[in-house]
Amino acid sequence: MAQLEVRNVTKRFAGLEALKDVSLNVGKGEILGLIGPNGAGKTTLFNIISGLYTPDHGNIIFEGEDITGLKPNEVCKRGICRTFQIVKPFTKMSVLGNVVVGALLRNSRPAEAMGEAERLLTLTGLIHKKDVPAGSLTLAERKRLELTRALATKPKMLLLDEVAAGLNPAEIDNIISLLRQIRDDGVTLFVVEHVMKAIMSVSDRVVVLSHGEKIAEGTPSEVSRDERVIQAYLGEEYSIA
């Protein structure tokens, strides 16, 4: 059974359909990639799943429960947490303090939350920066911080919105390794990404949106060969013979 089901979701803004009858499933323990051109509806879909938007039609089912229309904090409590395209840490707060904020969702005792935050900062390679203000971090470090803060909520599923954007090749390799480790630790990942090296190497399956509609779904190899995907997004230079 799928851990997450998106059933026939449609979302309109001032008459414009950002999503048109989109359906997909995410299996427990899977890394599902979501790609498509700008304006395809990827972030809109994440906003619906995470509770920021309510769909005009369709349902979101998580672990057998209809969570359509729940508020973001309620969705998070059920086990879905997300990151954002533009990272927004609490810049004047320490790196450790940022992660403690997430950890307090499941740990009512501050000492326990701090211990969990330090464990996760070790996992994501930021423990040496725990006492510095989050505003002093590089872009790559801020992305790791946002990922760490999301992990601190003890999610069953993470929605990651362009976690590799703006990173150099070495940083991309590091984030790919980290995502695999997170999945191996039992967290399902649903990943929006424009960096093809990252999304194609880390995903078990890939779903492609274009103009709000799902146009393809399959393994990275299958999707990269799909003519509709090549024409709508990847371009001929990405085609695999």
Image (cartoon, rainbow, N blue to C red):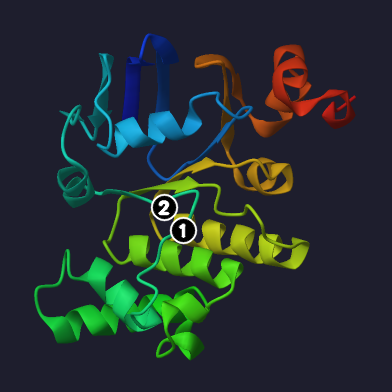
Residue neighbourhood size for the residue with mark 2, other residues' Cα within 10 Å, grouped as few (<14), some (14–19), many (≥20): many
Residue in view at x 89 percent, y 29 percent: 237
Residue in view at x 17 percent, y 87 percent: 111
Residue 216 point in image, percent of width and height: 60, 17
Is residue 164 shown above or below 105? above
For the image, the number of numbered tags is 2
Q: Image check: 109 left or right of 75? A: left
Q: CA distance from mark 1 to mark 2?
A: 8 Å
Residue in view at x 46 percent, y 58 percent: 87
Residue 179 point in image, percent of width and height: 53, 57
Residue type highlighted by circle 2: Thr
Q: Image check: 175 left or right of 84? A: right
Is residue 224 shown above or below 113? above
Residue 71 - label = none
Residue 73 point in image, percent of width and height: 18, 49
Residue 87 - label = 1
- Is 224 in front, or is 211? 211
- Is 35 in front, or is 211? 211
| Residue beneath disc 2 | 83
- Are dots 1 and 2 in contact, CB under 8 Å? yes
- Residue 101 can be seen, yes or no: yes
